[in-house]
Each structure stands twice: as C-alpha cells, then as structure tokens.
Amino acid sequence: MGKPRFFIFVLVLVLMSGCGNINMNHANSSLPEIEKSNEAVEKILTEDLSKYFTGYDGCFVLFDKNKGQYIIYNEQKSKKQVPPCSTFKIVNSLIGLETNVLQDENTVFKWDGTKYSISEWNKDQTLETAVSNSVVWYFQQVASKIGEERMQSYLNEINYGNRDISGGITKFWLQSSLKISPIEQIHMLRNLYDYKLPFATRNVDVVKKVLVLSNQEGAVLSGKTGSGVAENKGVNGWFVGYVERDNDVFFFAANIESDNHASGVQAKEITMQILKDKNIL
C-alpha cells in the first residue's frame, strides 16, 4: 500500500491499541468495587436498645438475611473484640469433626472422675450433650487432640477474630488470648449457615443440629451462650445464633460486660426478650 494509506493504517492500530488500554484500565479500576463483599451494600440501621442492657456495657447485632439488613445497638462495641468463651464451641466442634477427632454428635469422651460444681459435667459426654451443657472439659480434650498447629491453621483460614491461641491449647478461648467482636460472630454464623466455611457439608450439618435449642410455632432457634470469668467474677457474657422462620433467617449476637455479674445466662435472657419484642420469636 502507499505511504499515506500505510500511515493511516498504523495510526488506526495505535488508536485501537490506546482505546484498548483505556478500557482495560477502566475495567481494572472498577475491580475493587466489584470484589467488595455483599456487606458493602447491605443496610446498617442503628437502634437504641439500651433499656434491655441496664447495668451492663452491652451490644446487640441482628442481621435479617432476606432484607440484607443489620440492626445494631452500640455500634462501637459491635466492633470490639472480647474472648468468645463457650461460643467458641461452635468452631471447636467444626474443627474437631473436620480433623476426625470427633466422628459425629454421638462421639463419647469419658469423664475422668473430676468433680465439678456443675453436676451435668460429672459424667460421660457426647458432642451433643457437651454443647447443650456447655461442658468445658469435653472441649478441652477436643482442642488438645486437634493440637496447636491444626487449630491455628483453621483459625487463620476462617479468619476467626484475632486468631490468637497463645493462651494455651486448653484455655485460649476462656477469657484469655482469643478474641472476637459481635460483628465477626455474625459473619462466622452467616458463613456457617451458608456452607461458606472450609468444612465438609456433613460436619456443618452436625454442628447445626447440636446448636438447635427450640422449635416452636414455626420458629427454630439455634445458638450458644458463653461466660467469661476473671478473679471469680462474671465479666463477659455472650449469646449468639440464629432464628429460622417464615423462609427467613435472623442472625444475632449479644455481648455484655460488667465488673461482676455478666454471663451467658443474662445475655441469653436479654436476647430472647429483644427477639420476642421484635416478633422474631
């Protein structure tokens, strides 16, 4: 071809190449927006629920799955990490099942004869009874059999709280080094429910089964309490879980702290009242 036509041809190629670069750069610049989690566009509403938490430094987080909406009381505390205490039994169970330390909800660990103040602990336990009675010694055995290396690996993989097990393999979750926030508890529960954690479906189903607390009037309540003690004083109380009803799921996490009288029992009582007042239970 002649020189003028050649130069026009080259110019068109350059322009096409340039346009290609512009489009690619534009596409790349939008990737962070595309890759943001769905929570980036989920609604967050704050609500004054202080009347339920008299005497406590408290927080409540509720997530409505169908609406994609959070309701949060005490947003600052919802992001504060505190020890999970016995709510960690949820993850401890999952890891125990995944590593074959536990086979299913009927896996028995023998009581060693140590006398505990909680009478239900003074007998052999299955995973199901150990969750329902919140038997610490059972899950200390589970954690010991899992071992530090595997435990740390799984906590890193699921990004559980601060992932710190330096407090010791039998007590790191017991008002010790491991800490998690109420918002992070909700994230974990949502991922559990939707099978987005790195655990076999069967193992998730086992844990879901043992977490069920009641099934009444079409509402299935699943959850776990947790209590933190320091110097023989109740300083930390949790109740986390979810309610399934009307083809919807409501995830919740309540945490209370005080100098002397916070526990999972109180956290559960507060949560149950809130859920009833909101006609979720």
Image: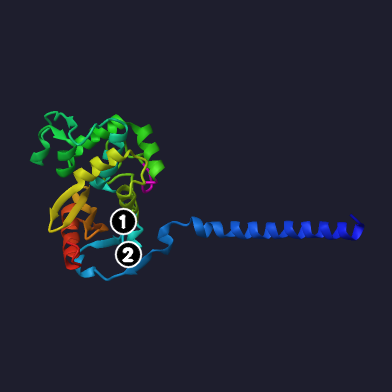
Residue at the right extreme of this rendering: 2
Quadrant in which the C terminus is drawn: bottom left
Q: Earlier in the sequence, mark 1 or mark 2?
A: 2
Of 19 and 251, the residue lying toward us:
19
| Vertical relation: 152 (above or below) 28 | above
- Three-letter code, disc 1: Pro
Magenta residues: mostly which secondary structure? loop
Q: Position of residue 147 (x, y in %)?
A: 33, 31
SS of the residue under disc 2: loop
Screen quadrant of the N terminus: bottom right
Q: Secondary structure at mark 1?
A: helix
Frontmost of labels 1 and 2 is 2
Residue at mark 2: 67
Residue 60's spot in the image, x, y percent? Answer: 27, 62
| Image x and y of residue 186, in percent | 31, 54
Viewer can see residue 89: no
Image mark for residue 63 = none
Residue 18 left/right relative to 274:
right
Does residue 163 show up magenta in the picture? yes
Q: Which mark is residue 182?
A: 1
Q: Which residues lie in the magenta part?
A: 159-164
Q: Disc 1 to disc 2, how far (Cα)? A: 20 Å
Tell me: 194 left or right of 118. right
**Which residue is found at the position 14% from the left and 52% from the top?**
214
- Is residue 162 within the magenta segment? yes
User: Residue 120, can we see it?
Assistant: yes
Q: Nearer the viewer, residue 234 or 95?
A: 95
